[in-house]
Image (cartoon, grey):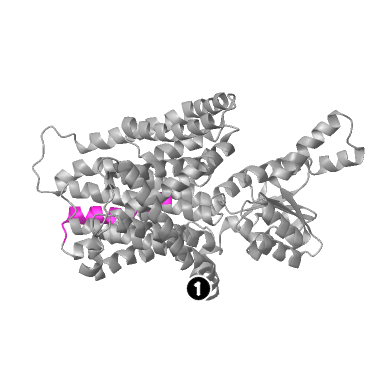
């Protein structure tokens, strides 16, 4: 029966055991991911008993990666990606180089060849996109500036790894003792061809994809069939990812991510994200199970010190390098530690690199098992890194002068320039967050001649605002120094338009301490959060769905002459919040 139905037996065993071990892990206050990984070890080929089909499990896991990245693309616009390019591109590339050197030196100290050590170092330098995005989603950080920076960072990592996977075979000929093939493509041609292919894919998605995908969703939605709509979403994610890999040599994950970004242009993108969520969760579980299936527990007893050394690179080296780079680029300490925590694990690209290194006879079999050991251990320990962010921020700020210097001192974007005339600011609006909502609020304030100061964590946005002549200060508004620079003490109103709900209370607390009479407006998309904020008396709360319903109903009432003039004036006064 097992041999005749490998797909069904693999699904049944993987999902069933994942449920059992996942529940057990949660009961023991351990992340459910640990249970999924353990389920994979149990049904893997390196433990006694039933062995599931690892090839089928791997393919199912690839579908999970596609759907997850597609969902992220639905929430991550091209504008978000471009806004963080000044930190994501140099940061990711420098981090890859630094961590590759760490891993290469470590492997070389064990007596490995340079080629094997290089592959090993590259495998330890790239984080798992699946783990990273699930961690950000679980903590509500995906739509925050920290989430945008981290997502942009990992996208750059993925693009870099696509180039590495293509270039590694021709480079392997030079690094190994295998005689060169006279018909092999020269290295410079391989590099040029890869860059052209990736460039063509990105251009195609930006030009054609932005028109085709929204049109496709619109046509399918007109049928009124929920099943067809769901099928359209899944088919688009999987088909584009597969086509990108086959035609352009782009990874499945990267192809699905760009497909989601382009489909985001449709008005049905929110519905598409909701429809694909159950499938994303189910297949993501299969991804973690497939990782566990590849792991040989014997490596822990055979080489415990080497496993610890790998974990030191992944859990200490990578976060330290990433955190330092983010601080050097003048971003807040909280952002730096969030990026560092997000990258303190390795995953799918590491497995692919390890497998390719084995096939090219560069990486020893021991290296592949060490990579898997590091991946599983780091994935289990990654939630602890996120829990340590806030305590670490408080501890470092209180004890490290260097961290405070890198974060704030002599940063031109952390202070309002004299050209804005800030010494005369009084009665202005302090606008926290300049994303899609904040930008529209700012446009309405400018149109009515109301002065305002923007407090925004994204340095690229602050630089553009200042170039356009607007008053803006860079930093996290939960830091008193940022609100002081925005002259909150003399402001008439505070508008918190950022999607980051974790700092709302801290921002309001600082603002009311510095200006007890200030009026606060808060944006939220969660009914539960809105109720809590209202009970705590934190200003006036604007719920996204509620304001949309109110705006539409008021328009209908005005159309039929049922809206009193006083209410119409009130509606006009709050129209900017929609």
The image quadrant where one finds the N terminus is top left
Give the image location of residue 43, x and y in percent. 30, 55
Identify whether 53 is placed above or below 104: above
Reply yes or no: does residue 9 show up in magenta: no
| Magenta part of the chain | 112-130
Q: Quadrant of residue 31?
A: bottom left
| Left or right side of 293 for 396 | right
Q: Secondary structure at mark 1?
A: loop
Give the image location of residue 398, x and y in percent. 55, 74
Reply yes or no: does residue 128 show up in magenta: yes
Residue at point 27%, 56% (across, down): 121
Question: Can the viewer see residue 161 in this picture?
Answer: no
Disc 1: which residue: 400
Q: Nearer the viewer, residue 245 or 54?
A: 54
Q: Main secondary structure of the magenta part?
A: helix
The single residue placed furthest to the front in the displayed view is: 1
Q: Nearer the viewer, residue 219 or 263?
A: 219
Q: Quadrant of residue 367?
A: bottom left
| Left or right side of 323 for 446 | right
| Left or right side of 288 for 503 | right
């Amino acid at each position: 029966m097992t041999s005749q139905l490998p797909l069904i037996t693999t699904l049944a065993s993987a999902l069933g055991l994942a449920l059992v071990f996942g529940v057990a892990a949660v009961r023991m206050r351990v992340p459910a991911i640990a249970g999924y990984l353990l389920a994979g070890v149990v049904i893997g080929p390196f433990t006694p008993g039933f062995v599931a089909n690892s090839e089928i499990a791997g393919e199912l896991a690839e579908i999970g990666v596609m759907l997850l990245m597609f969902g992220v693309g639905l929430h991550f616009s091209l504008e978000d990606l471009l806004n963080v390019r000044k930190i994501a591109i140099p940061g990711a590339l420098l981090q890859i180089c630094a961590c590759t050197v760490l891993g290469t030196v470590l492997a070389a100290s064990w007596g490995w060849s340079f080629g094997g050590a290089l592959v090993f170092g590259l495998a330890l330098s790239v984080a798992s996109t699946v783990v990273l995005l699930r961690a950000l989603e679980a903590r509500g950080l995906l739509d925050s500036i920290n989430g945008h920076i981290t997502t942009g960072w990992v996208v750059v990592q993925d693009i870099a790894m696509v180039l590495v996977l293509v270039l590694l075979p021709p480079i392997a000929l030079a690094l190994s003792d295998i005689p060169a093939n006279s018909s092999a493509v020269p290295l410079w041609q391989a590099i040029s061809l890869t860059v052209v292919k990736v460039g063509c894919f990105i251009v195609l998605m930006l030009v054609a994809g932005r028109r085709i995908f929204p049109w496709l969703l619109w046509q399918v939605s007109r049928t009124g069939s929920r099943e067809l709509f769901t099928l359209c979403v899944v088919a688009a994610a999987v088909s584009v990812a597969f086509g990108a890999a086959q035609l352009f040599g782009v990874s499945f994950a990267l192809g699905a991510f760009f497909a989601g970004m382009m489909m985001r242009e449709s008005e049905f993108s929110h519905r598409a994200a909701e429809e694909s969520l159950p499938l994303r969760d189910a297949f993501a579980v299969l991804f973690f199970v497939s990782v566990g299936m590849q792991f040989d527990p014997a490596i822990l007893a055979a080489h415990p010190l080497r496993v610890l050394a790998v974990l030191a690179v992944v859990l200490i080296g990578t976060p330290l390098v990433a955190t330092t780079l983010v601080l050097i680029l003048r971003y807040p300490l909280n952002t730096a530690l969030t990026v560092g925590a997000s990258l303190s694990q390795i995953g799918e690209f590491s497995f692919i690199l390890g497998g390719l290194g084995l096939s090219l006879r560069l990486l020893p079999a021991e290296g592949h098992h060490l990579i898997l050991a590091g991946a599983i251990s780091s994935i289990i320990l990654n939630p602890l890194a996120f829990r340590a962010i806030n305590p670490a921020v408080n501890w470092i700020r209180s004890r490290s002068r260097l961290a405070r210097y890198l974060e704030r001192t002599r940063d031109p974007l952390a202070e309002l320039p004299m050209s804005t005339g800030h010494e005369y600011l009084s009665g202005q609006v302090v606008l926290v967050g300049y994303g899609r909502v904040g930008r529209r609020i700012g446009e309405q304030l400018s149109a009515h001649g109301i002065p305002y100061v923007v407090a925004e964590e994204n340095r690229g946005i602050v630089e553009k605002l200042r170039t356009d002549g607007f008053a803006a200060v860079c930093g996290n508004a939960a830091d008193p120094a940022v609100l002081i620079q925005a002259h909150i003490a003399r402001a008439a109103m505070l508008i918190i338009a950022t999607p980051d709900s974790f700092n709302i209370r801290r921002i309001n607390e600082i603002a009311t301490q510095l200006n007890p009479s200030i009026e606060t407006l808060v944006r939220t998309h969660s009914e539960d959060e809105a109720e809590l904020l209202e009970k705590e008396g934190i200003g006036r709360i604007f719920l996204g769905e509620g304001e949309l319903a109110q705006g539409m109903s008021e328009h209908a009432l005005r159309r039929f002459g049922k809206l009193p003039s006083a209410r119409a004036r009130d509606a006009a006064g709050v129209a900017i919040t929609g």
